[in-house]
Image (cartoon, grey):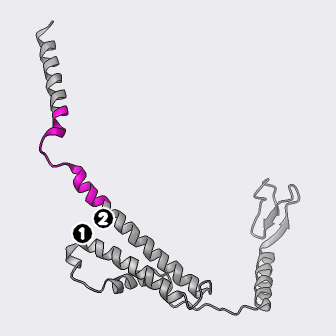
């Protein structure tokens, strides 16, 4: 056996020994910090879910899907759940823990995510309103349609010079 081969085998054995000894050493592990980061990210995701649930709940109430007598209690439960999550988040972020009004922070977060806060919902829609909307939509659609392709029969628009399906010239 060659002298260089012997040194190579010894070096490999030392590296394997160091690799096997590393978990037994007293070094701090990365998993402990990753666990905290994982818990923080899961709390942030839960906060986002509660905020989305509040938004959907408010929207359903405005649409008339939720009875008025159930709305305050169910919304208060969602707010309490969100406030508890914010309190847990404050344990990870001590600079914001001094703020005792977590429910107000949750309300502000919901309001900030709302696309259009002053939504007015029209509750009494008559059949005449629906018919007029349908008629206007059909008129708009008819104005855009130029009929059908003479070769393949697919619908074409006024702005089309060629059939989008078969390519036949429409001019």
In the image, residue 147 sits, relative to residue 75, either above or below, namely: above
Quadrant of the rendering where the C terminus is positioned = bottom right
In the image, residue 153 sits, relative to residue 107, either above or below, namely: above
Report the residue marked by disc 2: 40
Q: Main secondary structure of the magenta part?
A: helix
Left or right: 59 as drawn, with respect to 30: right
Part of the protein shown in magenta: 19-38
Residue placed at 72% from the left, 91% from the top?
125
Report the residue marked by disc 1: 92
Q: Position of residue 42 (x, y in %)?
A: 36, 63
Q: Are marks 2 and 1 in contact (CB under 8 Å)?
A: yes
Q: CA distance from mark 2 to mark 1?
A: 7 Å
Left or right: 81 as drawn, with respect to 62: left
Left or right: 84 as drawn, with respect to 17: right
* Earlier-in-chain disc, 2 versus 1: 2
Which labelled disc corresponds to residue 128? Answer: none
Which quadrant would residue 112 be assigned to in this image? Answer: bottom left
Left or right: 38 as drawn, with respect to 116: left
Q: Position of residue 60 (x, y in %)?
A: 58, 82
């Amino acid at each position: 056996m060659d002298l260089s081969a012997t040194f190579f085998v010894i070096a490999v054995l030392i590296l394997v020994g160091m690799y096997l000894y590393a978990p037994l050493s007293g070094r701090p592990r990365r998993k402990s910090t990753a666990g905290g980061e994982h818990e923080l990210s899961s709390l942030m995701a839960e906060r986002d879910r509660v905020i989305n649930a509040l938004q959907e709940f408010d929207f359903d109430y405005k649409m008339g899907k939720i009875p008025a007598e159930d709305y305050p209690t169910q919304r208060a439960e969602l707010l309490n759940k969100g406030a508890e999550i914010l309190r847990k988040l404050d344990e990870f972020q001590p600079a914001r823990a001094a703020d005792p009004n977590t429910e107000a922070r949750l309300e502000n977060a919901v309001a900030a995510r709302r696309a259009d806060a002053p939504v007015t919902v029209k509750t009494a829609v008559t059949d005449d309103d629906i018919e007029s909307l349908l008629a206007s939509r059909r008129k708009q659609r008819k104005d855009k349609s130029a009929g059908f392709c003479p070769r393949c029969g697919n619908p074409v628009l006024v702005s089309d010079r060629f059939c989008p399906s078969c390519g036949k010239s429409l001019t």
